[in-house]
Amino acid sequence: MKKTLYIFSNGEIHRKDNTLYFETETGRRFLPVEDTGEIMIFGEVQFNKKLLEFLSQKEIILHYFSHHGYYMGTFYPREHLSSGYMILRQSEHYLDEERRLAIAREFVRGAAKNIRQVLKYYHGREKEVGEFIAAVERLLPSVDDCRDIAALMAIEGNIRDHYYRAFDAIIGHPDFIFQERSRRPPKNYLNTLISFGNSLMYSICLSEIYKTHLDPRIGFLHATNFRRFTLNLDIAEIFKPILIDRLIFFLIGKKMITKQDFEQSTEGILLKDKAKRCFIEELDKKLMTTIQHREIGRSVSYRRMIRLELYKLEKHLMGEKDYTPFIARW
């Protein structure tokens, strides 16, 4: 499986023949190309058209983030698997309200059930989250009752509100009080971690979509509009609880990230580079972790699981098999 290359330093990326190198004030470092699938840039990095041509040839996606860790955009190479047929199927299902709603419901159901699984995991470790599990379970049947996307999004938001209220019981640390969900800017340390992790998850899902016949611009739960990509936001909803949120709980619980890893700026609270590296290293480990896949009968990595989710969606769009979301069992 191809790897992700992360760049935190300031410098310039250059193409030299059939390779790339990253040049900073301290020297030059050659970058592995053949086993790289995506590049995530967090530093102030300069590059030119030659680099983009090279990345397109090698089918390497480039995601870039602001100094604050916010997702800014993606260089999405010419789709080598682009399919007019699949774009038509996605469009048909989006434009047909019932068919769009059927897919969107499954995304919300998958997210809600994985939220419940996370809560159950910590309930089994004597965290006082029973009332939040009960609240999610009361709301779950409402997913089937929603007659439009707006109502479905409202239910999803309600479930997530109960879930976020459980974070203080799970974390139990005075430096990481949740208070309320705040984004740009995040108003506390915990919200900064959530926003950073979610940005990574959206980018990872986008990279996996590139390796399928699906078009990332046509989502189902999130409205297809002038925003560049939406399907990655849909798929990320399923995996954020089990990958990002559990990772945050782990990092705080093991004191791998503490309040010393943040700094205050005019644009809110920032995560320092050392902590970003720590977060990304542990997320990479999690993505490479293998689990037993019930349907195919063998172990696959979490990263592969995201791709398999997209393949299931393709089969649904082609009328081969109804889509059902991945639900964690632990």
Image: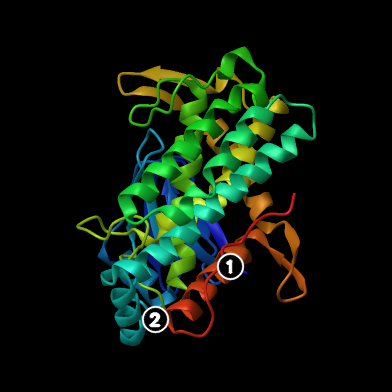
The picture places residue 107, in percent across and down from the top left corner, at: 48, 58
The number of numbered badges drawn on the structure is 2
Q: Nearer the viewer, mark 1 or mark 2?
A: 2
> 12 above or below 270?
below
Identify the image quadrant of residue 134: top right
Q: Residue furthest right?
A: 125
* Residue designated by label 1: 2
Left or right, 58 with reference to 230: right
Left or right, 272 with reference to 305: left
User: Sequence order check: which comes first, mark 1 or mark 2?
Assistant: 1
The amino acid marked with disc number 2 is His
Query: From this viewpoint, is residue 282 visible?
Result: no
User: Measuring 43% from the left and 65% from the top, which residue is drawn there?
Assistant: 103
The picture places residue 6, in percent across and down from the top left corner, at: 51, 50
Which mark, by number, is residue 80?
2
The picture places residue 269, in percent across and down from the top left corner, at: 41, 22
> Closer to the camera, 69 or 30?
69
User: Measuring 79% from the left and 27% from the top, which residue is drawn there?
Assistant: 126
Q: Does dot 1 land on a helix, a strand or a loop?
A: loop
